[in-house]
Image (cartoon, grey):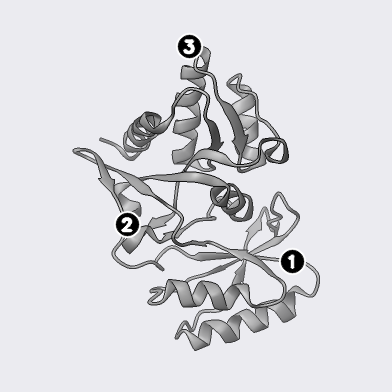
Amino acid sequence: MTVDEQKEAVGEAALKYVKPGMKVGLGTGSTAAWFVKAVAREVKAGLKLTLVSTSVQTTQLAESLGLAIKDINDVGMLDLCVDGADEVGEGLALIKGGGGALLREKLIWELAKTCVVIADAAKHVPVLGKFPLPIEVEPFAWKGTVNRVSDVLVEFEIDKLPVMRKKDGQPWITDGGNLIFDVACGRIEDPSGLGAALKSVTGVVDHGLFLDLAEVALIATPDGVRIVEP
């Protein structure tokens, strides 16, 4: 299977976790988009669901496919969230946020009873860190925040500086109005410790380490979809 075919396969496979009447969070990114398309087909065929979105991008896709997206504040707890990941590591520790939606994704994940991550085989790694770790930062006094983040990284033997993400030469602004800085960590030996230390920095809104949240990962391989549990 090609990479796109792998992504489509896991998007379809995730449908087995969807039951009539569920409240479902729709993830963001190229793999999650295949799940959104699969859900749209089933809803068109009569499946009743309440849907919320993790980003403006996903909302636009869902609505273009005829899906109604509810405000999470009107829905509350969710039964299920299905989303992609940039890296899936040991114990289903994840790096997410390559698409810039990490904060809203994490908010939705933490409201879901069950979180299913879907990814192609290239995203399944023995150690997190090859994919740059996104850190979402409040724009006010961002330079001071990033300096403190750099100090934290040194404590975890990561010598790379955070790099401001840009689009068309301008700072990337998240759906929440924040900046994103990416860190080429190389290897993250202590994801839990690093995540806690980053969150302790005033000005850091959140980071792309998703820990102890995923119940199961569906990993697409050239030979089919493999189920991975923590």
Distance from disc 2 to disc 1, alpha carbons, whole Å, reads: 32 Å
Q: Residue 2, how many percent across, how many down?
A: 29, 37
- Identify the residue at horizontal 65%, vertical 24% (top origin): 68
When the figure is inspected, residue 200 is found, relative to residue 213, above or below; the finding is: below
Quick check: 6 left or right of 197? left
Counting from the top left corner in percent of width and height, residue 195 is at 52, 72
Measuring 54% from the left and 42% from the top, which residue is drawn there?
28
Which amino acid, mark 2?
Answer: Pro
Pinpoint residue 187: horizontal percent, then vertical percent: 38, 74
User: Is label 3 in a helix, a strand or a loop?
Assistant: loop
- Tell which of 222 and 84 is nearer to you: 84
Task: Tell me: residue 207, above or below residue 146.
Answer: above
Which residue, given by chain and number where applicable, does mark 2 sit on?
Answer: 230
Q: Which residue is mark 1?
A: 138
Q: Which residue reaches farthest left?
A: 223
Binning the other alpha carbons within 10 Å of mark 3 as few (below 14), some (14 to 19) or many (20 upward) gives: few
- Residue 25 is left or right of residue 89, and the answer is right
**Which circle's residue, 2 or 3, is located before the other in the chain?**
3
Image position of 103 (left or right of 5): right
Secondary structure beneath label 1: loop
In the rendered image, the quadrant that contains the C terminus is: bottom left
Observer-side mark, 2 or 1, equals 2
Label 3 amino acid?
Ala
- Residue that appears at 74% across and 73% down: 142
Q: Are marks 2 and 1 in contact (CB under 8 Å)?
A: no
Query: What separation in Å lies between label 2 and label 3 (alpha carbons)?
Result: 34 Å
The amino acid marked with disc number 1 is Glu
Q: What residue is disc 3 on?
A: 45
